[in-house]
Amino acid sequence: MNAVEVNGLSKVFKKAYDKTLKGVFLSSIRKEKKLEQHLALNDVNFSVKKGEAYAIIGKNGAGKSTLFKVISGVIFPDKGSIKLNGTIMPLIELSAGLSRDLSGLENIKLNCAIYGLNKEKINQILPDIIEFAELEDFIDTPVKFYSSGMKARLGFSIAVHIDTDIILIDEVLAVGDKDFKEKCYERILELKAKGKTIIIVSHSLRPLKKICDRALILHKGEVKAIGEINEMIAQYEKQNPKKKKKVKKKVVKEETLVKE
């Protein structure tokens, strides 16, 4: 059974041309188009099995975040359809769901309530959320005084402690220290072991090998390949080799001492 089915998905963004006032006036007289169209997604098709961990790989601007936002319902597609079999938790921008004027504790209660948890359930998971986020000493502090790393820890901790069927993770692990990232990856593996469906985007390809079963390569809004995770990463790295940093050679001028 598939947890996610994406069929013929397309999304176009319209952007105004960057012109001077004179340029806009002349375009109006000439009846030129005033909007530039950008095809972010073009006929995207794929499915994710229930309980599968699935990676979406691609360069910046490939359309990964747009695809995630369409799946999560943040934006709507222009063409195509999405079928979700289960509840969904999108971890796209962790700090986006936090109110800066509320404390960490108040944000936890608010977000849990938004996702339908009753007071009893919130009180039950509250200590686990705080402990995982490592914010015991700052939980009563307003979020506006948190660093970006603290916000990310709080947002991630809330999300992974709310029971859901499908979890979308978009580059949210880019913030935080090495130890916390490892803890996040371990938590994701625990959720996978419980039968949760996970779709993840990350520029760090190595952790994906440990977490994911299959992957999709996205390039300029189009699906280029779908297959087993190791094969897809090898194919992507072959097509996008890392540029070697040029080492600047220092030219040392030797001074010849002439004895008189």
Image: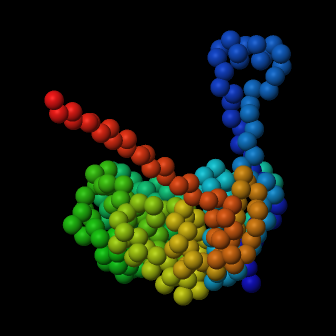
Which image quadrant for residue 218? bottom right
Which image quadrant for residue 226? bottom right
Residue at the extreme left = 260
Q: Quadrant of the C terminus?
A: top left
On screen, residue 202 above or below 40:
below
Residue at the extreme front = 260
Q: Position of residue 212 (x, y in %)?
A: 60, 78
On screen, residue 153 above or below 50:
above
Name the residue nearer the viewer: 239 or 69: 239
Rendered residue at 35%/59% (across/down): 149
User: In the rendered picture of this protein, how many numbered marks are placed on residues?
Assistant: 0
Q: Left of 145 or right of it: where is 223? A: right
Rendered residue at 78%/50% (across/down): 78
> Is residue 126 in view from this perspective?
no
> Is residue 8 in view from this perspective?
yes
Q: Left of 231 or right of it: where is 245? A: left
Name the residue nearer the viewer: 97 or 221: 221
Q: Quadrant of the N terminus?
A: bottom right
On screen, residue 17 above or below 172:
above
Name the residue nearer the viewer: 147 or 206: 206
Q: Left of 257 or right of it: where is 120? A: right
Rendered residue at 57%/58% (across/down): 242
Rendered residue at 69%/68% (across/down): 235
Image coloring type: rainbow
Q: Position of residue 87 (x, y in %)?
A: 61, 73
Q: Position of residue 89 (x, y in %)?
A: 56, 69
Name the residue nearer the viewer: 167 or 110: 167
